[in-house]
Amino acid sequence: MAENLYIPKEVSKEEVYKSLYPQLKALIADESDQIANMANIASALKEALGFFWVGFYRVVGERLVLGPFQGPIACTSIAFGRGVCGSTWKEAKTIIVPDVDKFPGHIACSSLSRSEIVVPIKQNNTVVAVLDVDSDQLDSFNEIDSYWLEKICALF
Ligand code: SME
């Protein structure tokens, strides 16, 4: 397992994702505990891409429960269909929110969060968790993020 991440500097976001992806793959390859893997992926994404908040919510019964994350403290439990995370669980597809104030029902864990992307993690076609990434800037996420974050989520 790699002990250090190599993060290229002064390159595009896409180049950072490209460099990071095989490192993340190697990082979690030998570990079957998904909480440990979520913890390292949250840390690596925060370090490499400087997100305001990055973390996981796991499906536990009827709710999404906060899992490993990096950033300010966050809501611990989200109902099915609620907020961006609960909507991603319900729709089983990635949601990009350019302006959280314009997303009906957005759950504001931090007033500093301005835009967001949430990606489902599926096992046997069922959503078992979501990856949530928040930015303190408007319109921070696009198809480059959804492409790479979906690839990263498929590693689980
Ligand atoms: N904004 C999310 C809640 C989680 S926090 O952003 C960490 C939502 O609307 O589901």
Image: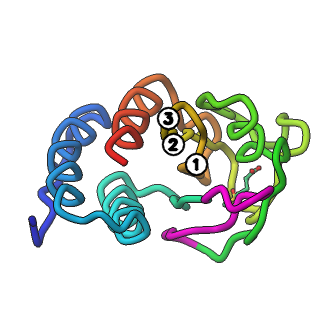
What residue do we see at 68% from left, 55% from top? 113
Answer whether labels 1 and 2 touch (C-beta < 8 Å): yes
Kind of residue sitting beneath label 3: Asn
For marks 1 and 2 on the same chain, the one whose residue lies earlier in the sequence: 2
What residue do we see at 76% from left, 45% from top? 86
Q: Where is residue 7 in the image (x, y as percent from the top left)?
A: 17, 54
- Local secondary structure at mark 2: strand
> How busy is the neighbourhood of tag 2: few (under 14 within 10 Å), some, or many (20 plus)?
many
Q: What stretch is highlighted in magenta?
A: 58-71
User: How far separated are the C-alphas under marks 1 and 2?
Assistant: 6 Å
> How busy is the neighbourhood of tag 3: few (under 14 within 10 Å), some, or many (20 plus)?
few
Front residue of this view, candidates 106 and 88: 88
Q: Position of residue 149 (x, y in %)?
A: 41, 38
Q: Is residue 14 above or below residue 131?
A: above
Q: Where is residue 53 in the image (x, y as percent from the top left)?
A: 55, 61
Instruction: Write down the residue under mark 1.
Output: 128
Instruction: Write down the residue under mark 2.
Output: 121
User: How far separated are the C-alphas under marks 3 and 2?
Assistant: 10 Å
Instruction: Write down the residue under mark 3.
Output: 124
Magenta stretch: includes residue 145: no
Kind of residue sitting beneath label 1: Val
User: How far separated are the C-alphas under marks 1 and 3?
Assistant: 9 Å
